[in-house]
Image: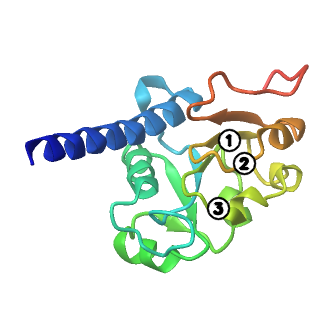
Amino acid sequence: MRESTALLEAVDAVNIRQRERTAELATSLLGTEGGRLDGRVVAVLGGAFKGGSDDVRDSPALDVADRLYLLGADVRLHDPCAGANVRRTHPHLAVADDVVAACACAELVLVLTDWKDFAAIDPVALGETVARRAVLDARLVLDRDKWVAAGWEFHALGRGRPARRSGSSA
């Protein structure tokens, strides 16, 4: 019994650290002084615990969104099914009805829930709505090559160095 408890505690610690790493990387990508994100626009794609659900209980996506919000970011979130639950449980977060509205003028786009809808996003079209073509795919949902070819600075947890289009300085 003690071994099972210890294993569950270790898994929980890893999961919490992953949330911290995601928020830290997002903050770093925004290049802010002192870790504050005051006024920086961040789009969060996903609020549900997992794709295909409207359940937001213990959602890693909402944990990361809250961390960024507490650092002063203007967090704009879109989730295909969980928007109403996010509005109810996290009224301080702006919930957008679609991806484009969430990403309008964003300096960083984060994919935090593994929705198939997000894999279908056209990075060329979305690039026209953001302030900066920078994306952090924390759920490994996006096609890296497609996003880089569209001129995005592409970061993904667990995939090493960021990918950039050849000749790009972004």
Front residue of 125/20: it is: 20
Going from the N terminus, do you reach mark 3 or mark 1 first?
3
The type of residue carrying mark 2 is Leu
For disc 1, the marked residue is 135
Q: Which residue: 69% across, 63% down?
A: 116
Whole-percent x and y of residue 134?
70, 38
Whole-percent x and y of residue 86?
44, 71
Q: Marks 3/2: CA distance?
A: 17 Å
For disc 3, the marked residue is 102
**Helix, strand or loop at mark 3:** helix
- Left or right: 40 in relation to 129: left
The type of residue carrying mark 1 is Val
Which dot, 1 or 2, sits closer to the camera? 2
Whole-percent x and y of residue 150?
88, 41
For disc 2, the marked residue is 142
Q: Which residue: 51% across, 65% down?
A: 94
The type of residue carrying mark 3 is Ala
Front residue of 16/41: it is: 16
